[in-house]
Image (cartoon, grey):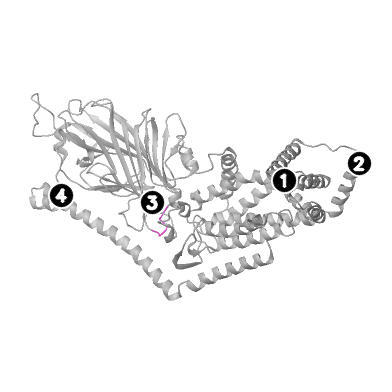
Amino acid sequence: MNKQSIIGLILIFAIFMGYMWWMSPSKEELSKMRATQDSIAQAYKDSVAIADSISLVRDSLMAAAQAGDSSALASLNPEKKMPDMGAFNASASGNRYMLKIDNGKMALEISTEGASVQRVTLAEKDYLSFDSLPLTLVTPSEDNMNLVFGTQDNRVVNTKNLVFVPFVDGNKLTGAKEWKIEDSTVLSLRAYAQPLSNDSTMQDAASEDQYLEFRYILKPNSYEVGFDIAFHNLDNVVQRVPYMDFQWNNRLLRQEKVDPGMKNARNRQKDPERMYTNLYYKPVSDKPDALSMSRDDDKQVKTSLEWIAYKQQFFTSILMAQDSMQFQNADVKTFTDKEDTADNYLVSMSSTIGIPYENGNGTMALQLYYGPSKYHELRGMHRGFERMIPLGWGFFLTQWFCRFVILPAFDFLSGFITNYGIIIILLTLFIKIVLFPLTFKSYQTTAIMRILKPEIDALNKKYPNQDQMMQKQQAMSRLQKSAGISPLAGCLPMLVQLPILWGMYRFFPTSIELRQQPFLWCDDLSTYDSILDFGFDIPLYGNHISLFCLLMFGMQMLYTFYTMKGQNQTQGMPGMKFMMYLMPFMMLFIFNSQSAALNIYYLLNLVITMAEMILIRQFTSEKKVRARMVAYENNAKGKTPKKSKFQKRLEEMQRMSEQMQKQQGRR
């Protein structure tokens, strides 16, 4: 790259930074923006309070309706018409209200209408959303859970339309609707059926001995919930089929900070939370699989499944089969609801799965998990859940490095260091020390090539033409060999480092341990650090400046200049030099919205790499290199130099290229 090109790049960067400074909002505008954000947060809290008030009003109306007040019943839902559910019409009405159980780790809200989990909120002492609001994994909807089956009188029953009667540890619930548990608790919700008489007509009253039961088994301080679907004396009520359809849906909310301009970005690489949010499923005899991460997707899975999971960046909801049961013929889907304009909406996921049905007295044993995506916690359940955490599973070197080097070192350091920024620094130093024996030869080769610059310049002048490339290559190879340089010494260590760099790229943005951990000016290492918000969006860049990313950009420019300085190997490829200087600008745009931890790692990696290169160059003696070259030339006199297989193949390829050029010239 010539002097004019360098000046041009500097001017472009200066104009770019000047533009961002000029267009940045004033202090008054920033204060208004903060006030707006506070208003949004308060509006959210108000909406939750309003929703709770509506729920109380609804409960009051339902109580009045049960007491015989027809106007109250009409007020609840004047237009809703209940479908004919035959034997289960007896459970089409009843007390509709929410049950809330807190086990210390999370609070589950389960509705008597549909017996479904309507809301799951993790304990505030452990986790909050990025805006300090309660972290909600499941949001209310009548379609959250629904079992579909047929009755003997040819009716189709959707459990979401049934009103269940709650029992706690076998006793009918008559008291509080909210409570905390200190021991294992079983919440049972029963939907009663009307028995059929001999003439197949319905009797008036439902039998207390015939019911469908949804059972939730909760333990204190646990993210796991036992979930059984039991049929009690329903042989003559429910149709006998091999499978029943179970529908499991969820509207996922954002839990992490995101650049507002990236929420609707077509390229999900710019939205880390959406990038790492996906639907996973585990075939019985195979590794876990997932839907597409780059777009909305759906799939019909014909193989038997062990579990299905709705995974976000740091949290996950899992539905799993128990007791050797398997899911069949699953239809899974991720989609973005275009009509959902809520600011905290992320994506929607749905599954329809076939659950084996035995008879009217059988039990479908399932289990639920609502909690953080921690590697050791997921791995401890021995179901393959840990493979949802992206640790480079597709390439053995990357996943081995992540599992057996990064994770143990990270766990060890976090055992006695509470500042995760310092842990990242120490982890980076550890990795560079481990890799130094590999990189030493590469950096030494670069230092020796710098010493050989006069000889390389002479060879370039001696063989200036393209048809002399073979002679030039042979002379260059002989020169490098005389100086003790191996042809693979420079590239092989770099190739070994690529899986490690990729592993770190995958590890830091998905490590929940870094979530909401502060370091220096950054208040959350798992997302970007912003020192200036523009108030408007710059395409591909965002609406903020990440200081760690900016420092990495400056360091990469300095590193590129230092490594390219004095190198004449690329004189015939000016485009290569341009790409080398363009790379830092590309990284600036790509990493501006990435996690601060990742930018810190790459920044430190560049600083240490450059320090190693400078030290190796300082301690590489030109006198010793020249002495080695003289000794090599003296020993090689009168001897036919041996050629490696690589050199022979290279020369053969060069001969073929020259022959083709000559043939084209004759034509």
Asked whether the beta carbons under mark 1 and mark 2 sit within 8 Å of each other, the answer is no
Return the x and y of residue 640 as percentages of the image width and height: 87, 37
Checking the image for residue 62, the label placed there is 4
Please identify the dominant SS of the magenta region. Answer: loop
Q: Is residue 497 visible?
A: yes
Sequence-wise, the earlier of marks 4 and 3 is 4
Return the x and y of residue 605 as percentages of the image width and height: 63, 54
- Disc 1 residue type (three-letter): Pro
Q: Quadrant of the C terminus?
A: top right
Drawn side of residue 203 relative to residue 609, left or right: left
- Disc 2 residue type (three-letter): Lys
Sequence-wise, the earlier of marks 2 and 4 is 4
User: Which residue corresponds to mark 2?
Assistant: 637
For residue 174: magenta?
no
> Which mark's residue is nearer the viewer, 1 or 3?
1
Sequence-wise, the earlier of marks 3 and 2 is 3
- Disc 4 residue type (three-letter): Met
> Which mark's residue is nearer the viewer, 1 or 2?
2
Asked whether the beta carbons under mark 4 and mark 3 sit within 8 Å of each other, the answer is no
Drawn side of residue 247 relative to residue 457, left or right: left
Sequence-wise, the earlier of marks 1 and 4 is 4
Checking the image for residue 437, the label placed there is 1
Alpha carbons under labels 1 and 3: distance apart = 47 Å
**How many labels were placed on the picture?**
4
Given residues 621 and 90, the one toward you in this image is: 621
User: Which residue corresponds to mark 3?
Assistant: 123
Asked whether the beta carbons under mark 2 and mark 4 sit within 8 Å of each other, the answer is no
Drawn side of residue 345 relative to residue 444, left or right: left
Q: Secondary structure at mark 3?
A: loop
> Which mark's residue is nearer the viewer, 3 or 2?
2
Magenta-highlighted residues: 127-132
